[in-house]
Image (cartoon, rainbow, N blue to C red):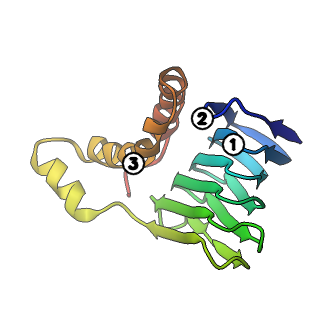
Amino acid sequence: RYGVRPPKNVDRVIIDRVADSTSDETRTITLEPNSHLLYCFAVLGGQIRRRLTINLEDRAKARVVGFFVGSGNDQYRLHITMHHLGRGTTGLTNLRGALGGSAFADATGLIDIPASGQGANAFFEARTLLLSRTAKSESLPSLEIAANDVKAGHASTTSGLDATNLFYLMSRGLPKLLSARMLVEGLLGAPLRLLPEAERVSLLGHLHAAVANLPLADA
């Protein structure tokens, strides 16, 4: 359990990277009034279960950015819960994943806004690329709202590589494998701009290595 305190308007950044392991972890973070948190995690191989719960007190802001890349028999179960306990809170979750082989990912989110959470701003987004016929993904975002003055929503997509974009890159002379890799990295890389430079560069290197190991020949 973690408690995050002010100073005001300063992000506390937590980076959580897991690769080639078996782990089952539950983490709860409470943000005190006016505190900010940027929480980033990357799951890059193994049998992983992660449960993250964030409690938001008055005017607290949390952004969760998560990446998962899997192949072979990798199995990921990721659950993000945001409790908007105070007034004027912000909680945003952005998950991006790419799965090949027989990998599986279950990426779910719960946005909970009780009556005390007036003025909350909440959104959960999960986007996953399936790069083989045997890779599978599930995403089940849900909302529980008791307050009447909130902004809340969710979006979830699971798809293969866009054939039009793949054709465009190949028509410019790029090999198919390189074109596919660029599209995967483009999807994964979009939220990285939210991170401080040092963390962004480090994590980008890990994502490049993970994508390079994906079986993209049949994508």
Q: Which of pointers 1 and 3 indicates the residue nearer the eye?
A: 1
Q: Is residue 18 above or below residue 151?
A: above
- Please, what is the three-letter code of the amino acid marked with disc 1? Asn
For the C terminus, the image quarter is bottom left
Mark 2 to mark 3 CA distance (whole Å):
33 Å
**Which residue is rendered at x = 65% and y = 62% of the image?**
107
Rendered location of residue 68, percent (x, y): 59, 48
Residue under pointer 1: 34
**Which residue is rendered at x = 61% and y = 69% of the image?**
139
**207 vs 133, nearest the viewer:** 207
**Which residue is rendered at x = 12% and y = 42% of the image?**
173
User: Which of pointers 2 and 1 lies earlier in the amino acid sequence?
Assistant: 2
Rendered location of residue 191, percent (x, y): 46, 44
Q: Judge left or right: residue 86 versus residue 190.
A: right
Q: Judge left or right: residue 192 versus residue 26.
A: left
Residue under pointer 3: 184
Rendered location of residue 144, percent (x, y): 72, 77
User: Which of pointers 2 and 3 lies earlier in the amino acid sequence?
Assistant: 2
**63 vs 59, nearest the viewer:** 59
User: Which of pointers 1 and 3 lies earlier in the amino acid sequence?
Assistant: 1
Circle 1: element type:
loop
- Please, what is the three-letter code of the amino acid marked with disc 3? Val
